[in-house]
Amino acid sequence: MIHRLAMDPQAKKHRIFALYFTLISTTIFLKETTMSIETQIDLNEFFNVKSEGKFHILTYKNPNNPCIVYDPGLFHTATCQTALCEIDKSDGQLYYRGINALDKLNDDFLDVAFDIIFSTSELHRNHFKQSVKKHFRLSEEQKILLDAISSTTHPMDVLSIMTTALSGLESNYLENPNDPIEKAAFILASVGITVSYRYSKLNQIDWIEPQLNRPYAEQVIFQMHGGKDPKKIEKLGKIFNTILILHAEHGQNCSATTVRCIASAKGTLYTAVAAGMSAFNGDIHGGASQLVSMMYDEIIEQNLDIDAYIDRKIQNKELLMGFGQRTYNRLGGCWDPRVEKMYEMLIDPEFDFEEIKKYKEVAVKLIQRVVPDSFYKSKNLTPNPDLFNCIFYKLFGAPKTMNTTMLAVGRITGWIANFYEHTQDKIPLSRPFDLLKDTI
C-alpha cells in the first residue's frame, strides 16, 4: 500500500515528515525529509486499521492527530460514509441503496430517484411524484429568465443559472419550502423544463403545455420537440428513462464531492446542486460526453480509418475520448456495467434508427480495435459511459453541446441525495490542509 503522509508543520521544531509508507502489519516506515532520518512508528498509535478486501481503511483515533495525509486528487481518501451508492470493488457492479442498478431499469426514473434520495414510505413516494408533475410547468419568471440568457451561453451554464434562481422562486410555488421532498421535486421538474424549453426555443419549436400523464423521461423529450411524432417520442422516452437511471448516481465523483462541500458550509440545496453542475461540466467529468461526440464527428466527416486513428493516438500519446474512468481503472479491467448495458442496447437489431447508424458503426469499430489492444489493456482503459451515451443524446435530437445537460437530468438525483445525506450526517465543514511547495 503506497501513500504519503506529513507530520503537522506546527509540531515541535516544525519537523515535516514526507513519506511513502508500506503497510506491513500495522507499522509505518517514515523518512524525515529535512534530516534524512529513518523513523519507525506504530500505525496503531494514530489510526484504527480495518481491512476490506485488498483495501486497508485508516480512521483517525484522535482528531488532533499530528499526521497529515498528502493525497492530491483525493485518490485514496474517503470523505464520507454513504448508503446511497456502491461500486463493488471486485466486479465493478453498481448498486443503488443495495440494489443492483441494472435490476431497476424497468422502473420509472422518478421511482428510482425517490429510492436513491429518500428510500422512505410509499405515501411519501406518491407525494414526490405528484410534486414533480405539479411543478413541471414553465412559470412566467422562468420564461423571462430563460429568454434573457444569450443563445451563445453553454447549456450547462444555463442549467446552473436556473437552478440557483430557484431559491428566489420557491416561496411562490412551494406549499412548504421546508419540505425536502417538495424541494427535490421542484428541482427535478425545473431541470426538465429548463432543458426542454431551451432546446425548443433555440430550434424555433413552439412551446406547448406539458401533458402530465406522461412519464418524466418521455415528458422531457415530448416538450423538446413540441409534441411532434408522439409514437416515436414514446419509444425514445423509454430509452431515455433507461439512460437516466444508469446515470442517476455514481459515488463520490468530482461533482458529488462539490455538492457535499457546499452542504458542509450550510449552503442551500439549490446552490449546492448548481455548484455540482458547474463541476460536472468540466471536460474530464460530464463534459467529456461532448468531446466524444466531437471525436465521432471528426471520424465520420473525414472518413478516418479507425486503426490508423488509434495508432496515431498511441504514437502521439494523445487521450482517446470514451475510454478510461478512475474507478474502473483500479478494478483490473472490468467494464462499467452501465457501459455494458448501453452497448447491448446499441447493437440490438431492434435498435434501428437511421440518424445514428454511422455513429453506431464507429462505436462498434472502436470497441473492436481498442478493447483487445495491449496498450490500453495494460492501463486498464476500458470503455466509459460517454462512448455511448452521446449517441443516445443525438438520437433524442440534442446537439453535442447539450450532452452534459442531458446527463445532468439523471445525475440531479445523486446531487440532491448527497446533499441531504451529508446534511443529515452532520459532517463538519470541509477544510483540508495544504502544504507549502517543495515540502514533499
Image (tube, rainbow, N blue to C red):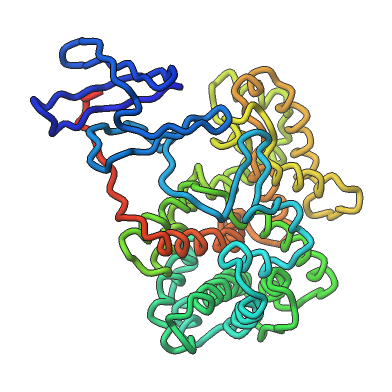
Q: Front-most of 108 and 166?
A: 108
Say whether residue 310 is left or right of residue 62. right
Task: Where is residue 402? Give x, y as percent.
Answer: 58, 58
Q: Front-most of 105 and 321?
A: 105
Q: In which quarter of the image is the C terminus?
A: top left
Seen at 57% across and 44% down, the residue is: 291
Seen at 52% across and 62% down, the residue is: 417
Q: Quadrant of residue 379?
A: top right
Q: In which quarter of the image is residue 294?
A: top right
Say whether residue 354 is left or right of residue 316. right
Residue 104 vertical position relative to residue 440 in the rendered view, above or below: below
Tell which residue pokes out farthest to the right in this image. 349
Q: Front-most of 172 and 125?
A: 125
Residue 136 in sight here: no
Residue 62 in sight here: yes
Say whether residue 262 is left or right of residue 149. left
Seen at 69% across and 23% down, the residue is: 308
Residue 42 vertical position relative to residue 113 in the rendered view, above or below: above
